[in-house]
Image (cartoon, grey):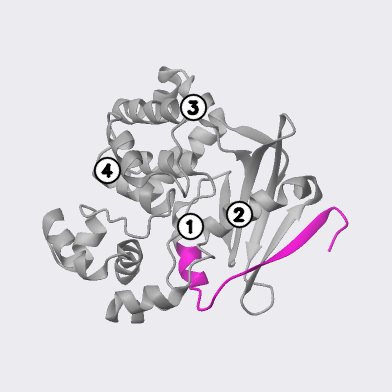
Amino acid sequence: MPADHLTLDLSFQPPLDWSGLCRFLAARAIPGVESVQDGVYRRAVRLPHGGQWVAGWLALAAAGPAGTLRLTLPASLAPLQDRVVVRLRRLFDLDRDPAPVAAGLGALGAAHPGVRVPGAFDGFETVVRAILGQQVTVAAASTLAGRLARQFGVPLAIPLAGLTHAFPDAATLAAADRETLGRLGIVRTRVAAIQGLAQAVAQGLVLAPGADVPATLRALQAIRGIGDWTAQYAAMRALKWADAFPAADHGVLTALGLRTAAQARAAAERWRPWRAYAVMCLWQSLG
């Protein structure tokens, strides 16, 4: 290991569907901010420390001893390593015991051993990405998120493997010029939703595990342009609510062979309190 890097092993309770996590995150990776290649997840990092911002990158791979993932960080992020580890454990759902999930999902879980619900390294970033994904393809949403990062994010001093920018924070996007946002290809309604979210987060809305789920869902849906699907997706990933269920999701309805959100909710009652894990299994079943 080079002297200017450090490695840490992150433990988890097997089984862990690492390839499934990588596929999900690769499809939604924000260009310049994240990449997933050859089973390695990399991302740009920017966190406050000692009254200033510290930027860098990280890489996570299934390269450690059994039951661990190996994290590589530049030495510049050593003072922040504990915070980085907490965020990565959330993102990859490493603190989840898979046994009760499998028992609760029954046959659906048996078809997808080690399923995890990808969380969020940064809740605000993930929910902005979800807003950009409304009524467009996954690839189109990633393209828009990459443009947003290039325009308003913070460039890395030393780019690595396609990582060039850290995603902009809430205060930056709350103050961003709407016309500039529009020129990135983001339609007016989503510009308003992103800035409404950014203002709420800048004013104290918490998008992280431990937040009051019902109150956060209400706060999100009070923002114009954020409906039930986006709020439930935010609860599923940013809040790590294991029972979140975006019932109107097209993939969920398709996998269940149903037409309406009400039908999907009724069908999903059998999977409580693990409906978010059921969603991941349903999405994976579509290939």
The crowding category of the residue bearing disc 2, from other C-alpha atoms within 10 Å (few below 14, some 14 to 19, many at least 20), is some
- Within-10-Å neighbours for mark 4: few <14, some 14–19, many 20+: few
In the image shown, does 146 or 265 lie closer to the viewer? 265
Q: CA distance from mark 4 to mark 1?
A: 19 Å
Q: Position of residue 55 (x, y in %)?
A: 70, 39
Q: Amino acid at mark 4?
A: Gln
Look at the image and give the residue range highlighted in magenta: 1-23
For discs 1 and 3, the disc positioned in front in the rendered view: 3
Separation of residues labelled 1 and 2 (CA atoms): 18 Å
Give the residue pinned by disc 2: 86
Assign the C terminus to one quadrant of the image. Answer: bottom left
- Give the residue displayed 83% in from the left and 64% down from the top: 1
Q: Which residue is mark 1?
A: 25
- Circle 3 is placed at which residue position? 202
Residue 135 is labelled as 4
Residue 259 visible within the image: no
60 or 30, nearer to the observer: 60
Vertical side of 245 occupied by 151: above or below: above
